[in-house]
Image: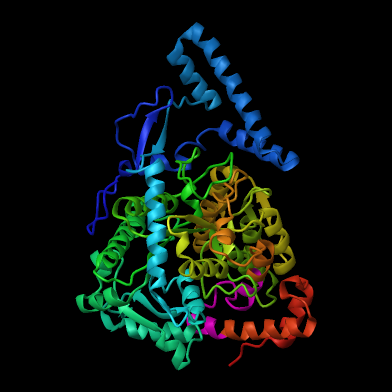
Amino acid sequence: MSEVSQTTLNNAPSRYIEKFDLHTGAVIDEEIKPEQLLVHAHRDFHFMDFEARRIMSRIVRTTGDREKARDKVRRMRQWGYRMTDRLARVIGKQKAEKVAKVLLGLKHHDYHYRFKSLPVTGAEAEKRIQQLRQDTQAQFAKTIVDGKPALRVLLTGGTGFIGQEIIWQAAHDAAVVEMVILIRPKDVIDRQTGQVVRTISPAERGAELLHRLWLETPEQQAKFRFVAGDIEQPMLGIAPDELSRLERTLTHVVHCAASVSFDDTYEATYQSNVTGTLNALAFSVHLQNVPDSPFVEHIGIETSYIHGRQMREPSQEDAMVFPSNYYNNYYELTKAMASIETETCMLMQGLRVLQLCPAIVIGKLRTGDNRGDTKVVNAPINMFGRIHETQADSHSSMAQRSIAGLMARLACVFPADPGAQLNLITVDWVADGILAALHHPEAVGERIHLAADKRLTPKAMGRIFKEELGLSIHLVEPTLFRTLLLPVFVGALNLFRQSKQANALGKLATLFGGYAEWDQPIHEVGKDLEVLKMQGPRPDMEYAFRMLCRHNLYIQHFGQVRDLNEISRREKLWKGFIDELEQRTGRQVGDISAEEFHKEAAAHLEFVE
C-alpha cells in the first residue's frame, strides 16, 4: 500500500493481500489473481460440495445450530482424509490424493490469504487517531456561527440511489448551508445516427434532479450547487477556478460514488471503487493542507460486505481481516481495498476520516420509495410480479398464459436457504447516518456499520411475496440451483424464445444466490447509536420489505414504469395516500394486511394525470 496518488495505480491484488503457508506462516511469493479471492473459485466443482452444503443447510434449518452443521461436515472431511491416508499406504500418496479429489472432492489447501499489515499499528495508530479526533473537534468548532454549525459539503455520487436520499435529507437539515454535488455532463445520443445531439450541463442535470426530489422552493434550491467533475480524474476533475472556491469554503467531503454492479469485471470495478477513492482522498488531503482551510473531515461510504464471507462470529466494525471464505464478487473485494486505502491515508497522511459501511440498501422504511432503482432486491420483486400479472391477465392468449405458467414454475424456484439472514438496510437509515456523521466530529477514525438488527430471511420473503403478490416461491439450496437446475431452466426458457427472461433469471440467480445461503455473515452494529447518536430503533426489515413490494407494484408496476419523472410524480402521490391512510385508520401502513391495503389502494390511489 502506498500513499494517496492522483494517478491510476497498479491494480494487482498483491498491493493489499498476500498468500501465506498455513503451516509455517511464511509468505508465498507468487502472483495473486483476482478470481482466486472469490468464494466460487474454491467450491461448487464436485457433487460432494453440493451434498455437504445440503446437509449443513438441513442441520441449520432443523436445529438453528450453525456450529453443529460445520462440525458435521468437518467430521465427514476428516473421515475422508483418514481413508486417503490408508489408501496412500497401498497406492502411494499422490495417487491417493488424486482418487480422493475425484471421488470425494477433497482438496488439500496448505495456504490462505491475509491483508498486508498497515504501515502503523497498535499503540502508535491509536495515538495518531486520538490526535486526529482532537484536531477534528477543534476544526468543527470553527464552523459554529451564532451557536449553530454552518456546514458546506461536497458530495460525490449524488445522482445515485443513496446520494439522492442524502440530498433530500440535507435539504431539511438547517446545519447544511450548502451542498456541492459533483456531476458529469451528459451527452444525448441520437439512436439512429449514434451522434451526440446535445450535452446536458451539470446545472441542467441538477435542476432536473431537484425537481424529481420535490425540492423546488427558492430556499431549497439555493442550498445546492452542481459542478462538473469525475471521480476517476485527479482532483476529481474539478476546474481550477472552482477548486479555488472550494478550498476556501468546504467543511466536509462525502465520497458516496461507487460501482455497485455485482457482475462487472475486476478492472472496471477497481477503477471506480479504488481509483475513485484514491482521487477523493487526494482531494480531501489537498483541502486539509490549504492554509487557513475550513475543512473538517472526509466521510467515506463503503459497505459492510468489506468483511466478505466471515461466518463464525459477527463481522466487527473495527476489524479488517481477510475472510475465511473469501468474497462473493469484485464489488466486495474492491470496496475492502478502498477501505484499506482510506485507513492508510488517515494514518500516514493525517487525513481526518470517518468510514460508514451500509449493508445492502433497499427503499425507505415507511413508503418503500426507491426513486426508480431496479437492481439487487428490487429485481426479484419485479420479476415475480411481472410473471404473476401475465398469468392473471385474462386478455393474454392461451399461448402467452402457457408460457407464463412455465416461467412461473421455473422462475419461482428461487435460490435461497430459508434460514439465511439477509443483511439489508433502508436508504433513509443510511442517509440518516451520513447526515449524523456531519454533526459528530468525535467519530473520526471509526468504521461504523449501518445495518439492521432485525434481519430478513428468505422464508419471510416468501411469505410476504405470497401475501402481497399472490405468488408462491419455492426455495432451493443455492448451490444446487446454480450448478444443476439453472442450466435446465435457462435452456427451457430459451426454447420458448424467452431469452430476455432467461438472461434475467440467470443473472438474478448468480448474483442474489450468493447472498441467500445459510452461512451469511452477521454484521456487528452498535456505533450507529452510540457514536453517531442516531435515534433507534433500527429498521424492521420485514416491514421494509413488505412496503418495498407494495411500492414496486403501484409505483414501478414491477419495473415497467422506467421514466424517472413519472416515478417521482407517483411517489409523491403515494406518500400522500399513505399519510391519509395512516391518519384515517390510526395504524402504520405496513401493519395493515395485504388484502385490506390493496382494497384501499384500489379505492383511493389514482395515478392518472
Q: How is the image coloured?
A: rainbow
Whether residue 572 is situated above or below residue 308 in the rendered picture: below
Residue 552 located within the stretch drawn in magenta:
yes
Q: Is residue 231 visible?
A: yes
Q: Residue at x 52, y 81 (%)?
A: 172
Left or right: 276 as drawn, with respect to 535: left
| Residue 273 in the image, given as x and y percentages of width and height | 36, 58
Q: From the viewer's side, name the closer residue of 466 and 81.
A: 81
Number of marks drawn? 0
| Residue 324 in the image, given as x and y percentages of width and height | 50, 37
| Residue 117 in the image, given as x and y percentages of width and height | 36, 40
Q: Residue at x 48, y 26 (%)?
A: 107
Left or right: 93 as drawn, with respect to 70: left
Splitting the image into 4 quarters, where does residue 361 fall? bottom right
Q: Residue at x 31, y 64 (%)?
A: 284
| Residue 103 in the image, given as x and y percentages of width and height | 54, 24
Residue 115 located within the stretch drawn in magenta:
no
Whether residue 356 is situated above or below residue 574 in the rendered picture: above
Q: Residue at x 54, y 49 (%)?
A: 514
Q: What stretch of residues is rendered in magenta?
A: 549-569
Q: From the viewer's side, name the closer residue of 479 and 332.
A: 332
Splitting the image into 4 quarters, where does residue 451 fall? bottom right
Quadrant including the C terminus: bottom right
Left or right: 244 as drawn, with respect to 223: left
- Of all residues, the one furthest to the top in this rendering is 90
Q: Is residue 400 visible?
A: no
